Amino acid sequence: MSDTVEIEGKLFVPAEAAAIAQWPSVVSEHPQPTLTLKDDDLFLITDTIGNIAGLLTDERQGSMGLFCHDTRFLSRLELQIEGHAPILLSSNARKGFAMSVLCANPRIGDRIRAETIGIQRDIILNGGLFEELKATNYNTQPVKFQLTLSFGADFVDLFEIRGFNREGRGQLLRLDQPENGSHNGNGSGEFGESPELMKEEDIPGRSRTSSGMNSPQELMLAYKGLDGSVMESRITFVQRQPDYLDGYTAVWNLELDSHETQVFGYRLQLLTDTRPTTAGNTPGSLMQAKASILMEEQEWRNSATRIRTNNKAINEAIEQAEQDIYLLRQSWGKGKALSAGIPWFSTLFGRDSIIAASQTLILDPEIARSTLEILAEYQGKTWDEWRDEQPGKILHEIRLGEMARCNEVPHTPYYGTVDATPLWLMLYAEYYAWTHDRDTLDRLWSNAIAAMDWIDREMEATGYLTYACKSNRGLANQGWKDSSDCIVDRDGKLANPPIALCEVQGYVYAAKQRLSELARLKKRLDLAERWEEEARNLKTRFNRDFWVSDLDFCALALDGEGKPIDGISSNPGHCLNLGIFTPEKAQSVAERLLAPDLFSGWGIRTLSRLSPAYNPMGYHTGSVWPHDNALIALGLRSQGYIDQALEVTDSILDMTITQPYQRPPELFCGYDRSEGNEPVQYPVACSPQAWASGSIFQFIHTMANLVPDAPGNYLRIIDPALPEAIESLCIQNLRVGSTLLDLEFERSGTTTACRVTKKRGNLRVVIEA
């Protein structure tokens, strides 16, 4: 594996290893605090004052900017007063699609005292970017000052920001400047090259106007890609127009009487070949954008389940998770699936989108249906080593940027994942159990058959589902732990492919068991009996080949020679809820996961701290992941380890309420919990992140222990249990089949009672103690 390259903890097998650089997570400099907004396929990252400072050529790895379709449409957005940055007073981006910033002036010579001019910035995303600024003079006398907004757009592909070098790229464009401003290069020289001077009529869909292109009313930044596509960031100024443009800087010369306020702003549209780049329409004003997105959000909330407890801090975490799940929905054709996370993974993923959809079945089953359909549309159809594609395989990741369009990366889509296909089958069966949606079951049955056929072909050689990268720009590790250094034995030695991960065999076992039931429903007894027998045989082999007797624990994986990779890791915890372990082995795994070398007090680590490869700051070698813990907690619950499941639940919830906005991060460092210390953040963790936010709902599911059977028209609630931090839990508008339910749980000591407070439908609810 010496020809592989590590990028942000992930291992790639590139054609030209030297052409790929490190990702931001391995940069030694600490990233500054940021604010994040998202709307469908659009997201914005700024500093805490709402600015995006202009980037230098050697700082292109910075993640701030306005992005759509894996392209940065805005790389500079810089508010200044008399050439200086404002003083931050407060900022908030809790709503996720809007931010509000209060700032003030620094001292301006002898003319204006510091913090006597107040500036309020309101920024909203809704099919475009909208900003309104209010400047107020709190001096006792009139003041004059200059306020500027500088814009820049480098149109860099997200893969470039993540470290992939390119041999060539397209050309930044500019037009003749109007008479009231002169080009000074602001925002257009990020690549150390002069933008190509073009006539307006050279840009598709544009025609020359008498005022020129860049005027006090409108400003355009544009780029022509290697594929010929022309991308534009078109800025239209509203209310008070700038006095003039200095290149790509809008200048306002303000004169404010005492306590006078002036309002001005702009709307930024994203265009590709003159057509809107974003999925939705762009409203005409900030107020329209705000009203539109609030109405859409309220419609979604009205149809989703409402979950609340008596604990205010936990309620804040639940409310934030609801908000983030709403925001992370992203359009793909006519449907929406959850994008994996901001900033690096704001796109459709196989594994991540499926797991997050499963986690949120209790919140909104529509997410699962749409996810299944979208992934089925992209299901592998041919043999293509460049994209690691095979017929029946579910994709890993899809990208829409220039590098994908030019075939410089294989993400069109890329299929290098071993677990997305069995996970898709599991979600397919789980969705039907929640909804009794026979139309979707029947419509996707051929996709399910194709997915199972892919699994069977891949298992022919070894009896296990394995992976080995075929693409020369693909991922070397293709399970959920896809970093370079995480698949290790007890001595810290790396495994050689093809690799069979333990949890993946559990997914295959569960898929065959669950699909056999659906095959009986479809009157395919031949398939039902075959899949049942294959599941039984897999369980027998698995318990024989993966068990490490002297450790009394399950191996992380088998290597290319079929030898156990016996590192002590969290992976076997995923198998606890799938039925693949014998009872004795399940008990041993459950108990081992809570030992101090794995359980940090904040959660279960990805790798034992006794391993030579352990690193509490490692991406998958000692860090703690909320979704990993949520899956393990569900597995502990299924094995009767209720107190242990609640202990894991408590640890992640305790961590979450210490985070900004009470939002669980993608991961955090695996240092031990100690009195007075908070969890240690992983510097470049995605936030929000779909399966981290989804873990909140999986923990709720674990507490309530719901077992839906919509086709059988009943819901089992088996021995519900609330942790000490929660005395009561209310679940309203829960959808099982065609029935809507309100449930209330109340804890008294160690006993939790449940009652149905409202039911609209004929579902039978069975509460089992």
Image (cartoon, grey):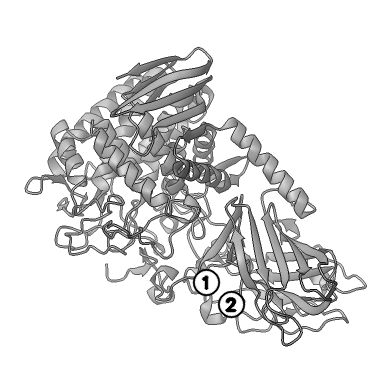
State the residue at coordinates (68%, 78%): 114
Q: Percent x, y for residue 513?
A: 30, 28
Residue 665 appears left or right of 172: left
Q: Is residue 450 visible?
A: yes
Mark 1 lies on residue: 62
Residue 316 appears left or right of 141: left
The answer to whether 142 is drawn above or below residue 659 in the figure is below
Tell me the tag on residue 55.
2
Mark 2, secondary structure of its residue? loop
Q: Quadrant of the C terminus?
A: top left
> In the displayed image of the protein, which residue is found farthest to the right?
210
What's under tag 2, amino acid-wise?
Leu
What's under tag 1, amino acid-wise?
Gly
Q: Is residue 445 visible?
A: no
Q: Residues within 10 Å of mark 1 (few under 14, many from 20)?
A: some
User: Answer yes or no: do the residues labelled 1 and 2 have beta carbons within 8 Å?
Assistant: yes
The answer to whether 638 is drawn above or below residue 259 in the figure is above
The answer to whether 707 is drawn above or below residue 702 in the figure is above
> In the displayed image of the protein, which residue is found farthest to the bottom?
110
Q: Residues within 10 Å of mark 2 (few under 14, many from 20)?
A: many
Q: Percent x, y for residue 474?
A: 40, 60
Mark 1, secondary structure of its residue? loop
State the residue at coordinates (46%, 54%): 414
Along the polypeptide, which appears first: circle 1 or circle 2?
Answer: 2
Q: Percent x, y for residue 392?
A: 42, 41
Q: Quadrant of the N terminus?
A: bottom left
Q: In which image quadrant can residue 457 be found?
A: top left
Q: Percent x, y for residue 596?
A: 19, 52
